[in-house]
Amino acid sequence: MEILCPICNNLINKDLPTTIPISNSQKLFHSNNYKIIGCAKCGLLQLNPLPTKEDISKLYSKDYYYGNEKNRRFQEIIEFFIYLTHLRLSKEISSLRKDKGKILDIGCGKGWFLAGCRALDWETYGTEITSSTSDFAAKELHLDVLSKDISECNFPDSYFDITTCLHSFEHLPQPVETLKEIRRILKKDGLLLLTLPNIDSFQFKISKYLWFHLGIPYHYYNYSTKNISTLLKKAGFVPYRISHFSLGYNTFGFLQSLFNLLINEPNFLYYLFKGNYKMKKLTIEYLYNFILTFLYFPLFAVISLIGSFLESAGHHGGTIKIIATNS
Ligand SMILES: [Zn+2]
């Protein structure tokens, strides 16, 4: 079947070459028969085959946010760090506008960012397709959250002052149509903020198909600064501020990718933080991975922290933060 790149309409028909030993990459990238294909013209990476509606409801089941009794995704300390990061971001976004208005966060998760905006006098709206998570936002934080895809929400024309997609845009199957819908519901002088992983980063270059932020099979597409800018312009937006540093996302992406190069079990550290291994039986392989992680953690943490600062300073950070105007 022919696959057209949604950005440049180029025919996508080739697998990107990998420098990772196939035994490692197969484990991560060919699970459930998913693989990554790339556009030779603009470099966009696409999951192939694209998940079906059935796959999506499984992927975003309660387990995605690790809906345990406390409805938390990670260990408490990590959750607290994520909470602080969202609060800081809400202050930053709020400062973009003198007059507070309506803000929509697409893929709002548990709603910490929106709660921060509400505390700064914004009228807040969210969408989140994981129903257990949208329930948390609605019932615990009393936020106005729809558990629907943005295409099904039917917001009025020119309704929002700001729309944000914080590490959610790469999860969306129809980027062009989604941007057109966002443009319709944004006011004429409205702002769009996207944060997403950067395939033009140093951490992707060193870890290739083992890069943590490829997010297989959750990310339909993975973008570079250049091709996301092209896509925004194609939809009628004007990108005006681009930056690359996020202490949490960049440093952890770097760190987990280094471990993916060392340890045969992909994203071992991530699942440790998530608490998934508590329910597993102890095996020799688990103990071996745990000891390796423990031994290498100090060295890799320092490399990741320094590496994240350096790659961001050189405009090749692990993430892209891009603000665009609705021209
Ligand atoms: Zn392309």
Image (cartoon, rainbow, N blue to C red):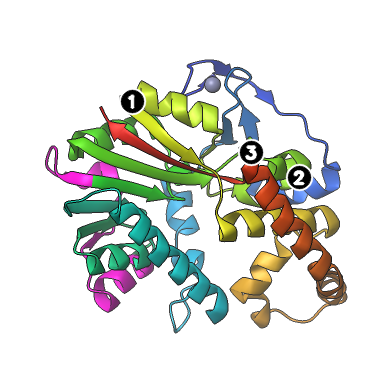
Residue at position x 25%, y 70% from top? 138
Of circles 3 and 2, which is in front? 3
Mark 3 near mark 1, Cβ–Cβ under 8 Å?
Answer: no
| Circle 3: residue type | His
Q: Residues within 10 Å of mark 2 (few under 14, many from 20)?
A: many
| Circle 2: residue type | Ser
* Disc on res. 316: 3
Numbered disc 1: secondary structure? loop
Please tell me which of labels 3 and 1 falls first in the chain: 1
Residue at position x 46%, y 23% from top? 7
Residue furthest out toward the bottom: 69
156 with respect to 68 (left or right): left
Mark 1 near mark 2, Cβ–Cβ under 8 Å?
Answer: no
Q: Residues within 10 Å of mark 1 (few under 14, many from 20)?
A: many
Report which residue position mark 2 lands on.
207
User: Looking at the image, which is closer to me, 187 or 265?
Assistant: 187
213 with respect to 126 (left or right): right
Q: CA distance from mark 3 to mark 2?
A: 14 Å
Mark 3 near mark 2, Cβ–Cβ under 8 Å?
Answer: no
From where the camera sits, is residue 74 visible?
no
Residue at position x 34%, y 57% from top? 128
Report which residue position mark 1 lands on.
235
Q: Which residues are magenta?
A: 132-161
Numbered disc 3: secondary structure? loop
Q: Residues within 10 Å of mark 3 (few under 14, many from 20)?
A: many
